[in-house]
Image (tube, coloured by chain):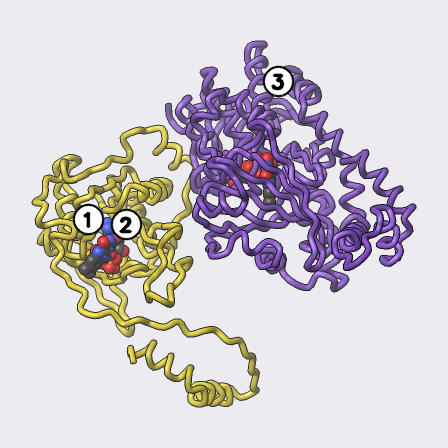
Chain colours: A purple, B yellow
Amino acid sequence: MNVTSKFDIIVVGAGPAGCASAYLLAKAGFKVLVLERGRGAGSKELWGGKAYAQPLREVWPELDKEAPIHRWVSKERFSLVWGERALTIEYKLGRKVAFTTYLTELVNWMARKAENAGAIIVDEVRVDEIVVKEGRVLGVKSGGDTVYADAVIDAEGVNRLLLEKLGLVEKLNPDHIALGVKEVLSLNPNLIEERFMLGKDEGLAWFVTGDVTLGLPGGGFIYTMRDSISIGLVLPIGPAAKAAEAGLLKEHVSSLVEAFRLHPYFRNLWREADVIEYGGRMTIEAGLKLMPRKLYMNGLLVVGDAAGFLVNTGYTIRGVDTAVTSGKLAAEALIEAFNNGGPTEENLKSYEEKVKKSYIYRELKNHSSIGDVMSDPFFFQKLPQVAIRAASKLFEADYEEPKLIRSFLDAAREEDVSSLKIIYKLGRVVGKL
Amino acid sequence: MRIAVGIKWVPNTQAVRFDPETGTLIRKGIPSIVNPHDLPAIEMALRLRDAVGGEVIAFTMAPPPAVKGLELALGMGVDRAILITDRVFAGADTLATSYVLANAISKVEREYGKVDLVVFGQETIDSSTAHIPGQVASWLDWPYVYYVKDIQVLGDGRIRVVRELEDYIEEYEIELPAVLGIAVRALKPRPVSLYNKLRAKLNKDTIVVWGNSELKLDPRCVGLKGSPTIVAKTIDMPEVPRKKEVYKPRDPRDAARWIVSKIVEDEKLRELLVKKLWGG
Ligand SMILES: Cc1cc2nc3c(=O)[nH]c(=O)nc-3n(C[C@H](O)[C@H](O)[C@H](O)COP(=O)(O)OP(=O)(O)OC[C@H]3O[C@@H](n4cnc5c(N)ncnc54)[C@H](O)[C@@H]3O)c2cc1C
Ligand SMILES: Cc1cc2nc3c(=O)[nH]c(=O)nc-3n(C[C@H](O)[C@H](O)[C@H](O)COP(=O)(O)OP(=O)(O)OC[C@H]3O[C@@H](n4cnc5c(N)ncnc54)[C@H](O)[C@@H]3O)c2cc1C
């Protein structure tokens, strides 16, 4: 084979979505080329830290044994913090549902699986253009070189410059995306287990809301890895930019993460830990709104973040399992299309149908109204303040403890919010979470 | 023409942090890169090949991750690459390094045919001794010119090289084979191309790995054992903390006076600078 010969399929982007497609297609015997701009698959990845295992097992049944799993999430925690006060709820899981790891490691493993199945992965090459002629995708172009294929899978992630060029999507709207900034703190595994009360190989996922974001929409996360802790903040860009313009957000987001690391309620958990890594990356806030006009065209399929397939529930971000699942559905649709005469527009329609029938689409629809919550400052300012004040009345009574309802009503009054409004807003949000 | 180009896999010193306690560089977790000053050497080799035909072979002595550096050279258009790697080569000073590299050139000649030219970068960003090219030339007993800016192939087994120094330009005509050190920024390196990367990926023999079982060198002459250099003294260079002040005088002479007065008046800064510049 030489460089000008045609591939069956070219995958742009070796993220979870691209690797899943490439693996399944190579395993089915297709000539697959994966192009990745980073050095090594996974090198450009940054996430919070928790992957749901079952959708991944559907592609790699050997996942539990082979994948670089750091810890199985055995505890989920939620905290509301305001000032020096905090309210925390913890749930202990009964089975292995999700695991923590570095996405870089996980994607690297997925890429090796694809390579071992026969896919060719070329890294440190950026695709500049998806080549289309008379409505049909012919291949991809990088610099002055064009490589041809019967079909292209676009797995380029959230910043979809290629799809923009094709006119399949609009420019990203700041209200539909968020910025994540994180730090990795290295700590001895024994200390992690002691401080978070975890067994060996057990992990914790923690969602934090309140004034860690200065009352802006968004929240903080904490994940325990094998020998490190990942902490960070995710801020929807639209409201954060408005707050910055209004002079309410004066610092760089990284200093908010630093304040989170130094927060008195949390900081002892990672005492003596070293910051070994920090970074930022964009993520999706409103998946459904990011969906391209069409998920397919003659010779092209769009998978993963590029297609908006990320479920943001307001307290967790699920993008990896949905990316993998969409990669799998794309591979299945392509295999069927090749068996039916080729990846024509007509034959690839089944991909969109598969997606619409899958849990991805149901989940996206299910959580789509979370956007109303995320854009309402009430939930990030007044509500946490009322809740913390109510808790302080319950737990910081020197002589007389008020009844639960009294503490709530008093807190609302003191914060100058009508209790009816709170009940109304909460009633609406419960239906949306 | 068969041209070999030596590259070094170095920690990206721009990303290296300094440990003020031990006075050493923290290399852990720092991404490595091809020594930037080697890129003009690769470019020079490729231009010569493109002009007169032949092949370019990139080689490096380094631990296995350096294969990523060779992939970059292949992406630029180098024809084949050799990774020289073995535990016994570890801990080498420049003498032991150049000994291995020179022997690798001899093996290249045995495997692929006569080498006409070996090109190197001017120096590395992590050690910058600029010893390697000259030492390799000595081991091979080939002529050596450094700070080379331009090369013309004369056709009768000779080349003309242009060497640019601070205030004059020299031209040499030398017989091949020869070793050249290419000047920093002599040429703008070409970007990596998809076809070149793909060609390297599709052809399994583009990268070969040679250890000492291939080179068969006396273990006493390589690695730590073959390194007579001793580090007599290291002076800890303190990091001068940055302070930002902006002063915008009309007359640049006022700016000079202002800077000097800053240094003279601030005792701590003065000491730090003296230590940094002259080691105390
Ligand atoms: C802060 C943060 C926290 C998150 N936390 C979680 C979490 O805990 N759990 C979870 O499941 N998900 C999480 N996510 C989401 C998850 O990381 C993504 O949904 C997932 O990585 C999407 O996979 P993908 O394959 O579609 O795209 P990506 O992972 O973005 O991969 C795209 C790849 O394509 C490459 N590429 C792009 N353009 C080109 C081009 N032109 N040429 C060549 N290559 C190109 C990129 O370099 C990249 O490697 C988080 C995201 C962020 C930002
Ligand atoms: C006592 C002592 C102990 C040392 N121990 C170690 C050690 O344990 N580990 C370690 O990594 N280093 C060690 N070094 C440093 C190492 O010997 C030098 O970095 C190496 O010999 C190259 O020298 P340089 O970086 O100054 O290259 P220069 O001479 O400045 O490089 C000039 C050009 O030579 C070429 N070149 C340089 N190195 C290579 C190479 N390896 N392969 C191919 N081409 C090359 C490049 O084209 C480069 O531009 C030690 C040095 C000393 C003095």
Circle 3 sits on which residue?
A: A344
- Above or below: residue A346 compared with residue A389: above
Q: Secondary structure at mark 1?
A: strand
Frontmost of labels 2 and 3 is: 2
Q: Secondary structure at mark 2?
A: loop
Q: Residue furthest top?
A: A340
What residue appears at the point 36 percent right and 50 percent down from the top-left corner?
Answer: B32
- Above or below: residue B11 compared with residue A101: below
Query: Are discs 2 and 3 located on one and the same chain?
Result: no
What residue appears at the point 46 percent right and 50 percent down from the top-left corner?
Answer: A186
Q: CA distance from mark 2 to mark 3?
A: 47 Å
What residue appears at the point 57 percent right and 22 percent down from the top-left corner?
Answer: A328
Q: Is residue A235 left or right of residue A45?
A: right
Is residue A145 in view?
no
Q: Is residue B121 left or right of residue A413?
A: left
Frontmost of labels 1 and 2 is: 2
Measured from the top left, where is residue A246 in percent x and y? Answer: 77, 62
Subunit ID for the residue under disc 1: B
Residue B117, labelled with which disc? Answer: 1
Query: Are discs 1 and 3 located on one and the same chain?
Result: no
Residue B7, labelled with which disc? Answer: 2
* Quadrant location of the N terminus of chain B in the rendered image: top left
* Amino acid at the residue labelled 2: Ile
Measured from the top left, where is residue A314 in percent x and y? Answer: 71, 40
